[in-house]
Structure formats: C-alpha cells, structure tokens
Amino acid sequence: MNENRDKDVIFTTPPQETGPKKTEPKAAAPQGTEEKERTGAVSLREDASAPATSRNEGAAGGTSDGASGQKGTLPQEERKVCSSNQSAEKSAHTAEAEPDLAYKNGKEVFKSGILGFFIGLAVIVPGVSGSTVAIIFRLYDKLLYALGNIVRRFRKCVRFLAPIAVGLVIGFILGFLAIQKLIDISPFTVIGLFAGLMLGAFPAVYDEVRTEKKTPLRVGLFLLGLAVPVAVAVCSVFLSEGGQSLEGLNVGHYLLFLVLGYLVAITQVVPGLSATAILMAFGYFTAIMDSVHLSYWQSNPAVFGVYACLGVGFVLGLVTFSKLLTKLFARSRAAAFFVIVGLSLGSIVTMFFNPDVYAVYLRWTTDLNVLDLTLGIVLFVVGVVAAYLFVRYERSKKRAPAVPKSGRTI
C-alpha cells in the first residue's frame, strides 16, 4: 500500500509541475501587451502613411492564441488616432494661412484709410486702382481675405474693413465734389498726375513676379491682362452707346445695374481695371454722376432703385470675387499675378485714352492748349517720382528686420 501511495504521489507530481507551464503563456501575455503599447506609441509619432503590417509584426512575437483577437482592433484604433492627428494638423495649417487682421498701431489704421481713399477715387478717376495701393501697402491679401470671409469671420473682418470704408467714403465724396470738377476743367492735367502716380507705383506690382520664371504661358497671361483694359478703353471711346438716361427704366435695366455693380466691384479688387471705364463703356457714367443732386432726386425718385441695384451688385461682387481670387492665389499665385501685372500696365496706358481725354485730343487738333499740355506733363513726372520714392521706402521697410524695444532682432 505504501508503495502504491508512493507511486500515486510520483504519478500525480508531474501534472502539478506542468500546470504552471501551461499558465506561462498567460503570464507572458502582459509582456506582449506592453510591447504592443510601446509599438503603438512609436507608430503614432511616425507618419500616418507607415504600413500597418510593420506595426503588427512587433506585437505578434509575444502574443498567444488567446490574445490574437486583439491584433485587428489595435491598428484600427491607431488609424483613428492618426486620422485625428492629421485633421488637427490640417486645421492648424489653415489657421496659420489666415492673415492677421488686427491693427497693431494707429499707423496701420491710417494706411488702411489711405487705401480706402484711393478705392473711392477709383470710381471717379479713370485708371486709378485701389488694389495697386493695397499691393504697395502689403494689404492686398488681407483685403481679399476680409472681403471674402466677412460672413464667416464677421467681427474680425469688419474691424479690419472699417478704416477702409471710412477712407472710401471720403475719397468718393472728395473725388465727386473736387476732382471730378477739375477733370471737367482740365482733364489732361488731372489725369497726368494720377497716371504718374500709377506708373511710379507699378514696380511694386511687378515685384510680385520679378523672381518668377517667365514661361511662354505666363508671358501670354501678361499680354492677355495688358489687352483687357485697352479693349475696354477702345470700346468706351468708339463703341459706346452714348449717354444713357436713368428715366423710363424697366426690369431689364435694373438687372443690368445689378451686373454693372458686380463689374464695378471686380474693378476694386483686381488691379488695373477701372470702374469709370466700365461705366463709360455702357454709357452710364455721366448719367450716374449727374443724378447725385437733390433736385434730380425730387424729380426722379426712381433713381434710388438704380442706386440699390448698383449697391447690391457691388456688395455681392466684393464678397464672391474676393473669395474666388483668394482660392486662385492659393492654387497658382504666380500665374495670376502675371495677369495682374498686365492689367496694371494696361490701365496706365488707358488713362490717356478714355472719352474725357479723347475729347481733349479732338479739341487740340484745332486749338492746342500749351499750358494744359505742359502742366499735365510736369504733374505726370511729379507723380512718377513721388510714387516710386514711396515704393522704395516700402521696399526698405520690407527688407529691414523687425527690432523690438529690447534691441534684439526678431
């Protein structure tokens, strides 16, 4: 019996020893899990495009059959986390692309007011471009962003646009009351001054493409931009329907004024296009200018419908076309600016070829006014020199490093 008991003991001892051996994979499972966690942490820091198999291989070594059910779930969780990281990085990149619209000092507010002033003048003086001034002041991208995102970023954009709007009103009123009267008296003299200013500022526009490669396509885009304002000027001089009236209008006329308001808005955000030339080409410039009078409003109150249609089209044009230009610059900024350079140069040429100046040329064929001619040439030279000196000043500021009050360079 004792021998049998010893045999039983001897017989039963091996299963007790093998029991822990069966549980050894269970004890090793946490090690495999820790290796998974380490591998997953490393993979999250790597590029999201890394193959998932390379992450699973490191985790497969210490995993038993009981833990194999977790192999497929971990990569899915990692992909979700990586996708979230990619979305966060994309959002951060978008936020970085948004320009800073906050004014840091009164000088920046004043510059925006000057920009608005020239935008207001552009409606009165043929060839004047507020967008060209925006490029000189390095406010062009901010202006497009603020106009195109005024609904989505209302408070931020309105704060940026407020000084520009004030300057626009002042420029329009001054242009209507003073400069337009001077144009009626001596158009060549006034046009000479503003043409000189635009020509002197042209290098600031050309700076945008100075270092870009001049491919045949880009040269063609430049020539296309050069031809557009020239064609508009020719149409306004030779193909215009003549002076139109704002009386006896029908629904078709009001729809036309919506379109004209939209076109005028485009001229305000695209350098080189003239709102005056557009209105002259359709024959409504003189009629609209003459309608701004109390006696006319009393005799023809329907003109306020014209103003309303022009205003609605103008606002729609500013918002939608600015948004379009922002997207276009994001895709192909260099090609777009080759067109803008051509438009800017063409608009300077057309300042000396519009209905007002053409009428002066016709008068000079029989009676040359030497004083007007001389004064126009002198003011043209003065405008070129003054604007170019300002462009050089802005270039020097752009190249100079920003130095804080502590004296260290940022």
Image (cartoon, rainbow, N blue to C red):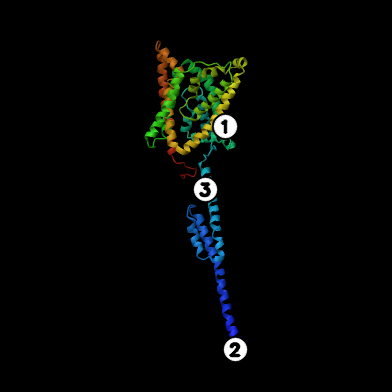
C-alpha separation, residue under disc 3 versus residue under disc 1: 33 Å
347 or 372: which is nearer to us? 347
Above/below status of 81 relative to 16: above
Q: Can you tell which mark lies on residue 162?
A: 1
Task: Give the secondary structure at mark 1.
Answer: helix
Image x and y of residue 371, in percent = 41, 15
Q: Specify which label sits upstream in the sequence, 3 or 1.
A: 3
User: Which amino acid, mark 1?
Assistant: Ala
64 sits left or right of 358 in the view: right
Do the residues under discs 2 and 1 have CB atoms within 8 angstroms?
A: no
User: Which quadrant, please, contains the N terminus?
Assistant: bottom right
Q: Quadrant of residue 250?
A: top right
Q: Residue furthest top?
A: 366
Q: Is residue 281 visible?
A: yes
User: Which amino acid, mark 3?
Assistant: Glu
Q: Specify which label sits upstream in the sequence, 2 or 3.
A: 2
Q: Can you tell which mark lies on residue 3?
A: 2
C-alpha separation, residue under disc 2 versus residue under disc 3: 77 Å
Residue bearing mark 3 = 89
Q: Specify which label sits upstream in the sequence, 2 or 1.
A: 2
